[in-house]
Amino acid sequence: MMGVNFTRAMLLSALLVLSACWGGDKTGPEDIHWDRESCELCKMLISDARFAAEVRGGAKNKITKFDDIGCAVNWLNEQDWAGDPATEIWVADVTSTRTNMIWLNARDAHYVKAELTPMNYGYGAVSDPKQGIDFAQMTAKILTDTPNHICKVPLNNN
């Protein structure tokens, strides 16, 4: 009888560990595996720490990674849960390096023009509110600029 209880306890422990791995309760950005993970929208490898972005949200609170805040904005704009206040959007500070990532809440960050970003949207994030434009202004500019996305990939496979 002792063996059955021990086995049940071990199975319950394993299920708890596995459920933590499936994500529902996670928050915040995750590490990026440089030059191995690709941007969800444009499929380019994520290589430049200064412009990386991540979105966490949806039914499974899944993290999605991007090489440029412009890709994140375009991708998120097509999600039905984009306006959910629980959706987290993270962007790298333009001073970030692969070994020293500085993540900013994208909604609180300010955006300065950058000469060249991975997908040429041209915005880098800073924390200083005296610089650049705010998140709403940057988002509006990205969504209204033409062409909106230089290598737009259809999000559905029709």
Image (tube, grey):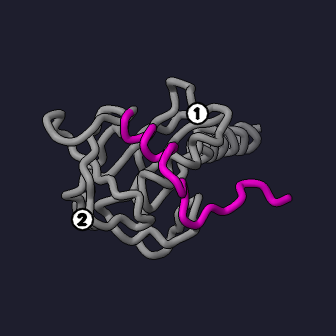
Q: Secondary structure at mark 2?
A: loop
> As rendered, which of 77 and 31 lies closer to the eye?
77
Crowding at mark 2 (Cα within 10 Å: few <14, some 14-19, many 20+): some
The question of residue 155 being in magenta is answered with: yes
The residue that mark 1 highlights is: 82
Which residue is depicted at the point 50% across and 43% down? 144
In-front residue for pair 40/57: 40
* Amino acid on which the number 1 mark rests in the picture: Ala
**x and y percent of residue 132 in the render?**
22, 42
Q: Picture coordinates of residue 109 (x, y %)?
A: 28, 38
Position of 145 relative to 130 (above/below)? below
Rendering quarter of residue 140:
top left
Q: Which residue is mark 2?
A: 97
Q: Is residue 15 left or right of residue 105?
A: right
Residue 44 sits above or below residue 25 on the image: below
> Which secondary structure lies at badge 1?
loop
Image quadrant where one finds the N terminus: top right
Amino acid at circle 2: Thr
Report the span colored magenta. Answer: 137-158
